[in-house]
Image: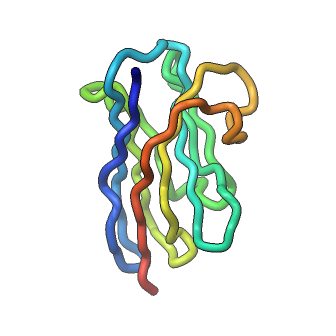
Amino acid sequence: QVQLVESGGGLVQAGGSLRLSCATSGRTSSEYVMGWFRQAPGKEQEFVAAFRWSIGNTLYGDSVKDRFTISRNNAKNGVYLQMDSLKAEDTAVYYCAAGNFVTGVRSPLKYDLWGQGTQVTVSS
């Protein structure tokens, strides 16, 4: 059974950078979409970014566009999330997700595999 494992979270000052990694154990379909979502205390889950494995297309949430970059992690059959110019409002638990679908990349309901989450805290 395929599992997703996130790493790379931590505490950083505003304006700093972090890189999250999502590794998969087991084989995944080449048509998989891999995405990142986040959830802050008291807030709804928010779409952050997605990567379509077969063609390398990327999509970003409005609040992170031009600051975050999702890319392929070939060594671990997963994805990275490079987060630059971090703000206090980026503080959340970040989840990696994967699913095999064509449309609806921003909806968490489309993803059927989820990691355990990694905490990102940005101090102002």
Q: Is residue 43 above or below residue 56?
A: below
Q: Is residue 28 left or right of residue 26?
A: right
Q: How many numbered tags mark residues here?
A: 0
43 or 91, nearer to the observer: 43
Q: What percent of the width, then of the height, locates residue 36?
A: 53, 45
Q: List the single residue furthest toward the bottom.
A: 124
Q: Quadrant of residue 66?
A: bottom right
> Which residue sits furthest left?
75
| Residue 72 drawn at (x, y percent) | 39, 31
* Residue 28 vs residue 56, the one in the foreground: 28
What residue appears at the point 47 percent right and 47 percent down from the top-left corner? 69
Q: Quadrant of residue 11?
A: bottom left
Residue 31 in picture, x, y percent from top left: 55, 14
Q: What residue is rendered at 46% in x and 86% in y?
A: 124
**What residue is rendered at 34% in x and 74% in y?**
12
Q: Is residue 112 left or right of residue 94?
A: right
Q: Position of residue 71 (x, y in %)?
A: 42, 36
